[in-house]
Every structure is written in C-alpha cells, then in structure tokens.
Image (spheres, rainbow, N blue to C red):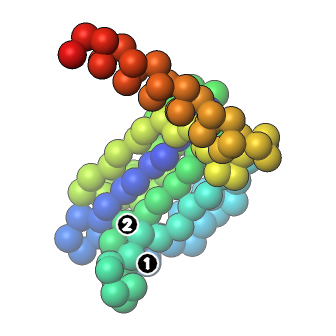
Amino acid sequence: MLTVVRCLYRPGGADERLAIRDIHVAYMIENRRWLDQGGALMSADGSVVEGMFLVLRHETREAADAFLANEPYTRAGLFESVTIEPFERFVPHPDPQFLEHLLVSAREWIARNLRTHEQRG
C-alpha cells in the first residue's frame, strides 16, 4: 500500500527543524525500507521550505500513522497541518502497457455510460 503524506510547517517550524535535522535524517535512514519517495515542499519561487512530502510503502494505514507519529519533526510539533492519503501509482507502473489498458477501459466506460445516458434522455 502506498500512502502520500503531506506536512506543512507551522510558522517558525521550518527554521526550528534545523536543530533536529540530523535526528530526522537518521530516522529516515533507519526506516528507508518504508520510503518510496520524499523531499521538501517548496514555495512557488523555490526559495522557502514550506513542508515535507513522503510516499510511504506500508501494509496498513495504521502502520503509516505509526511511522509519522514517531517521525522527529512530528514529535517536535513542527507541522501546522498533515494529510495522509492512500495512493495508487499509475506512473511508473510495473505493467509497461498499464496506461494503454487504462485508456481502453476509460473509453469502454464512457461508451457504455453515454449510451445509457442518451437512452434515458
């Protein structure tokens, strides 16, 4: 199961993170088996760190919640908001023809539903 985690710093949180960044990085190294992707969320002009973005690989939502609860920035109260959402990866996909199959399915669904809608209308 992939889970997207988006954390935005509270005012001052981005600066406060620097004092414990080594602990955060060590936690990420220790738990890298769960990390699919991760990095800083930046302001539109790229000059200010606004938060953290992770894609986690866990078996359950509870496991993702536990990972985040033990994450040093979370424990330090640096985040103003956190969202955790299940994620289904389409790209890249293990099946190199996944998008082509998805296109066929989408067109079939549209054709079926448009016919049904037109028959009702």
The percent coordinates of residue 74 (x first, y second) are 39, 53
Image-quadrant location for residue 49: bottom left
Q: Which residue is mark 1?
A: 18
The percent coordinates of residue 28 (x first, y second) are 62, 58
Which residue is drawn at the image coordinates 41% and 69% (left, top)? 41
Direction top: furthest residue: 120
What numbered label is drawn on residue 48?
none
- On-image quarter of the N terminus: top right
Which residue is drawn at the image coordinates 59% and 29% (left, top)? 105
The percent coordinates of residue 51 (x first, y second) are 37, 66
The secondary structure type at the circle numbered 1 is helix
Looking at the image, which is closer to me, 60 or 120? 120
Seen in the picture, residue 61 relative to 26 is either above or below; the reply is: above
Q: Is residue 23 visible?
A: no
Distance (Cα) linking label 2 and label 1: 13 Å
Looking at the image, which is closer to me, 111 or 46? 111
Name the amino acid type tagged 1.
Leu
Name the amino acid type tagged 2.
Gly
Image-quadrant location for residue 12: bottom left
Q: Which residue is mark 2?
A: 51
- On-image quarter of the C terminus: top left
